[in-house]
Image (cartoon, rainbow, N blue to C red):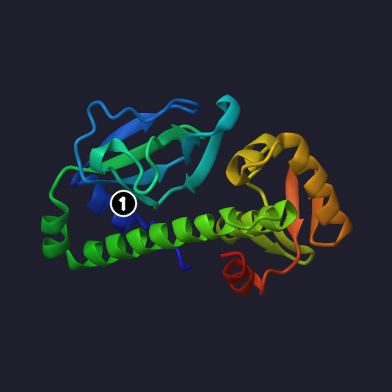
Amino acid sequence: MNEPGFTDDIYARLAAICTPIQVLAGDELSEVGIHGPIGFVSAGRLAVVVDAEAGRTRTIALLQEGDAMALTGGGWPGAPGARVRAATDAELLVLTQSLDDVLCSDSALAAWIIRALAFAVADRELSAAIALEPRLERRLILKLRQLAERWGKVTPDGVRLDLRVTHQELGDMIGAARESITVALGRLQEQGEITVRRRTVILRQMEDQPAAATESA
């Protein structure tokens, strides 16, 4: 999956036709006052969460600068009851015009929006495929690789994931208890799949990720 990128030019084009919505870390994006078919994360990071068993929540997507999200009905497509929560202070640009009008009037922006939407669909499909993997350790390493594709940095030791998520947050992403994540991380480290240094995870090179993701579906 190739991210569409978020250049200064694209931001300027979007800002001219969007309304900015500010969301503080920990707050949920309210449907009240949001009028538009689609939003674009222009700063910070948003988490899409759903209620799970035992009063817990599950994170089904993480959105960063440049990501697109449909706002139809105020929900998250394919996940009834999903809510959008700010993982950090964030800003969302909400489109104020008809999407059809934008696609017809600005070819450069239209191409970017289509790529952003295609990336969102592909990322969501990968998350769904990972969720179907029955083995916890396999599910965890696939999720770490998915996150590292977006937030990782290549180093001589491997791909360093500096997202700084907690064991609880990782558990929320793959439907596992915090204690199970701690044990699974230890086993993956013993197997040489990862190296854990405080809250930083280093993954060995990920050339096999596309095949691995397919196997989990």
Q: Is residue 5 visible?
A: no
Q: In this view, does 171 lie to the left or right of 195?
A: left
> Badge 1 local density, few (<14 within 10 Å), some, or many (20+)?
some
Q: In this view, does 92 lie to the left or right of 210?
A: left
Q: Position of residue 64 (x, y in %)?
A: 46, 47
Q: Position of residue 56 (x, y in %)?
A: 57, 29
- Amino acid type assigned to the residue bearing label 1 in the image: Tyr
| Residue found at the far right of this picture | 190
Of residues 109 and 185, which is closer to you in this image? Answer: 185
Determine the image quadrant of residue 21. Answer: top left
SS assignment at label 1: helix
State which quarter of the image contains the C terminus: bottom right
Mark 1 sits on what residue?
11
Q: Can residue 130 be seen in this view?
A: yes
Q: Position of residue 186 (x, y in %)?
A: 84, 48
Q: Residue at x 71, y 58 (%)?
A: 138
Q: Residue at x 45, y 33 (%)?
A: 85
Q: Which residue is drawn at 79% across and 61% down?
A: 193
Q: Where is residue 53 in the image (x, y as percent from the top left)?
A: 57, 31
